[in-house]
Image (tube, rainbow, N blue to C red):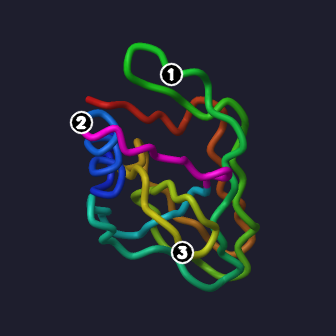
Amino acid sequence: MTAMSDFVEDAVLNLVLRGVAYTGGANIFAGLYTTPTTDAGGGVEVVGGGYARASVTTFDPAASGQTSNSVSVSFNTSTAPWGLVTHFALYDDVATGNLLYHGPLTVPRTVNAGDTFVFPPGNITISHD
């Protein structure tokens, strides 16, 4: 199950209750983690071995409180082991930026040198539950 970050929770409250506009990022990037993530941005993101956050170019229209990626999201091919990837997060910047959503992978995956981690269409599902 995914969770909204503290940043997004505050943005929604400010929009709905105070009329303060929120401008979403023009680009969304997925990050991979080897420890649990938190609403405040906790967790250990993969570093080194050719790792970089991957662009998420398209989400399906939201319906019934959820949306999913509509195209594959591919990370660079690892040049060294990344370890056991257990969680993911979405950001509004490729390197820093604001954490938007995060959650555990349905099935954790060990990424070895030479592997390419891919989220097929529909595998990043974001919901408000």
Q: Which residues are magenta?
A: 17-28
Residue 54 picture location, percent across and down: 67, 59
Indicate the quadrant where residue 53 lies: bottom right
Q: What residue sits 43% from the left and 61% below the top?
A: 99
Report if the CB atoms under discs 2 and 3 are less than 8 Å apart.
Answer: no
- Marks 3 and 1 sit apart, C-alpha to C-alpha, by 26 Å
- Marks 2 and 3 sit apart, C-alpha to C-alpha, by 28 Å
The kind of residue tagged 2 is Leu
Residue with the mark numbered 3: 96
Nearer to us of marks 2 and 3 is 2
Question: Quick check: 27 left or right of 40?
Answer: right
Residue with the mark numbered 2: 17
Nearer to us of marks 2 and 1 is 2
Q: Quadrant of the C terminus?
A: top left
**SS class of the residue under badge 3?**
loop
Q: What residue sits 46% from the left and 56% below the top?
A: 88
Q: Residues within 10 Å of mark 1 (few under 14, many from 20)?
A: few
Q: Earlier in the sequence, mark 2 or mark 3?
A: 2
Residue 93 picture location, percent across and down: 60, 65
**SS class of the residue under badge 1?**
loop
